[in-house]
Amino acid sequence: MIELLKNKFIQLFKESPCIVFAPGRINIIGEHTDYNEGFVLPAAINQGIYIAVNRNTNDTVNLYSIAYDEYYTCSIDEIDKINIHWVNYILGAVVVLREQGYALQGFNAVITSSLLVGAGVSSSAALTSGVLYAMHQIFSLDISRIQMAKMAQQVEHRFAGVNCGIMDMFTSLMGKENHAIQLDCRDLSHTYIPVDLGSYVFVLMNTNVKHTLASTEYNVRRRECEEGVALVTLAFAEVQSLRDVSLDMLSACIPYNSVIFKRCSYVINEIARVSAAADAMVKNNLTLLGTLLFQTHHELSTLYEVSCKELDYLVHTVQGMEGVVGARMMGGGFGGCTLNLIHKDFVHGVIDTVKTSYEADCKLDFNSYIVSIGEGARMIPN
């Protein structure tokens, strides 16, 4: 993949590039808690976005995507939002950098990916984070990785229309090999948790149901959480977010059978599960970790209502299978992948069984990936 990327860059721009890699991520647990100022437990993975890039001298931005076989060019002084989604993330990164006073010139870039778009492994965050890291490198900008994560979040909000939290970008930039990140999304304090799974592995199972978060109910869920906080603060003025709310407080302020109660109670429970899961990983209690994953999926499906029939099918199919200790939907929802914790000796048998039943019953292709935990955004030596 890297050789293909380099060769295409040389073909287009007649010079050798720098190569930047920015990983996708899994989120072990802590779904939809980041924009509620809660905790998350993500990890960077060994698949991601590759960017071949160099500065040029003509103040143009020249972009090519291998995956889409698309070329785009514009003046760096005439950037505007357009209807080509992969280009928007790159242009958005340039706009945010320049607004914050960083001097950029024109540049050339070729992009390719080993990530599945729409599978819930944060391909968009990896792209935006990778572009910011590439600009930091080729223009010698003085930007910390946490600053880049905040900038990447702005790009998602303004150029993609997704009012997301910071978890995905933070993980792509701050990932550490063989470690998860226990991240406090209120103040971005974080702790690296060793990922020592022993005889177990994380496996992604892809529904091949594509989601576009901006056109689903992702933003609706965020508004519902904000409505819940507003109601609770009428009685508890100290509350700033769902991070500060207990189930007792919620029950005192919001009718138990309401949609808002369901949404908020899921978030409160999930924030507590993140701490329990991190403790389980430190103590190498994978049975407990697996139980927490199943609990998260059940509530994402029934309380937060961001699952879909295909995700539920995959989780229900593996539950109780020999060698499987946990599974849940992962990502914003409405499609994408499930995250499964499976003993190595049973992985291929589980995958074969699930593939056969899923393709027969759901009439969709099925694929799966064993993931390993890698480093955050970095330069790839030529």
Image: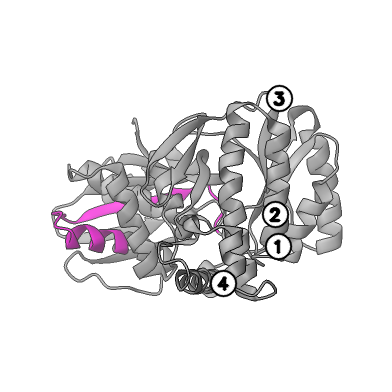
Estimate the x, y position of residue 119 in percent, counting from the top left. 59, 56
Q: Secondary structure at mark 2?
A: helix
Q: Secondary structure at mark 3?
A: loop
Question: Quick one: label 2, few (<14), some, or many (20+) residues within 10 Å?
Answer: many
Tell me whether circle 3 and circle 2 mark residues in contact (CB < 8 Å): no
Q: Which residue is mark 1?
A: 301
The quarter of the rendered structure image containing the C terminus is top left
Instruction: Work out whether 224 lies above or below 40.
Output: below
- Residues under labels 3 and 4: Cα distance? 46 Å
Q: Quadrant of residue 325?
A: top right
Q: Which residue is mark 3?
A: 199
Q: Which mark is residue 297?
A: 2
Residue type for callout 1: Ser
Q: Which mark is residue 253?
A: 4
Tell me whether circle 2 and circle 1 mark residues in contact (CB < 8 Å): yes
- Residue extent of the magenta highlight: 92-117
Task: Between label 3 and label 1, give the one nearer the viewer.
Answer: 1
- Residues under labels 3 and 1: Cα distance? 29 Å
Q: Secondary structure at mark 4?
A: helix
Residue occupying image coordinates x 27% and y 50%: 13
Residue occupying image coordinates x 70% and y 74%: 257
Residue type for callout 3: Ser
- Residues under labels 2 and 4: Cα distance? 26 Å
